[in-house]
Amino acid sequence: MRLRLRKAQAAAGDITLLFGDEAEALTHPYLAQAWARRGADLRIQAPGQAQKVALMGALDAVTREVSARTKRSADFVALLEMIEHRYGPEASGPIRPVVLVLDNGPVHTSKLTTKALAARPWLTVEWLPKHAPELNEIERAWRDLKRHYLAHRTFADANDLQATIHHAVITMNRERTQTQSCDSLRSAA
């Protein structure tokens, strides 16, 4: 119920609502909705040992834009700095309260993160219940990234995967922020 209220506040322009979380991607193929001829196995080459790239990001509930970065030990604080630069009190534009929706993952509740959140009184955290990823809208963005940009591909190394993720997020944001107008469609009747 609270999340529905927060979404309504964001849609009205009263607050900035962000959904934050982490995801992982592998250099070996992610298989999503693939098919093969009956009786044939789907085979995608995946030589060597898989390397992992961990991501963290925030999804703006209104613009649907994803801000993503790779995840290392203290990168959640860097994500908070990115959010502060973009939406904080010193950012250009009207000052609105910022609400960040997070799960109770260890990176979100660590001492370092707790201290960084406390240093940002303009930022309110809305904690999700445990084991409820369906409530965090950035999970859908991570799924789209994996299904549409990373699926069925093998990457040379973690740097190649990171570069692909970076370009994919830019493309996703461009697609999500384009206005879809029906004005240019002609009637077929």
Image (cartoon, rainbow, N blue to C red):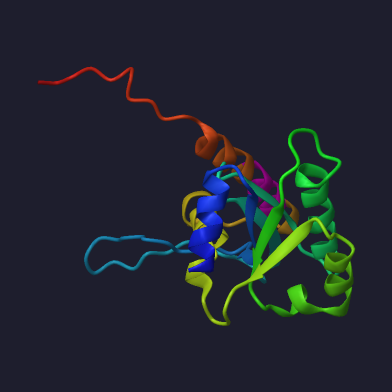
Q: Residue furthest left?
A: 189
Magenta segment, principal secondary structure? helix
Q: Is residue 34 left or right of residue 167?
A: left
Q: Quadrant of the C terminus?
A: top left
Residue beneath the point at 84% across and 73% down: 114
**Position above or below: 110 against 16:** below
Q: Is residue 91 left or right of residue 15?
A: right
Residue beneath the point at 32% across and 25% down: 182
Which quarter of the figure has residue 122? bottom right
Residue beneath the point at 60% across and 44% down: 65
Residue nearest the observer in this picture, 134 or 56 = 134
Give percent across and percent down for residue 89. 83, 45
Which quarter of the figure has residue 24? bottom right
The answer, for residue 142, to whether it is visible in the render is no
Q: Is residue 181 left or right of residue 164?
A: left
Q: Which residues are magenta?
A: 160-167
Q: Is residue 97 left or right of residue 180?
A: right
Residue nearest the observer in this picture, 169 or 138 = 138
Give percent across and percent down for residue 41. 34, 68
Give percent across and percent down for residue 31. 45, 64
Residue nearest the observer in this picture, 88 or 155 = 88
**Position above or below: 8 against 42:** above
The answer, for residue 38, to whether it is visible in the render is yes
Q: Is residue 165 magenta?
A: yes
Which quarter of the figure has residue 63? top right
Give percent across and percent down for residue 186. 23, 17
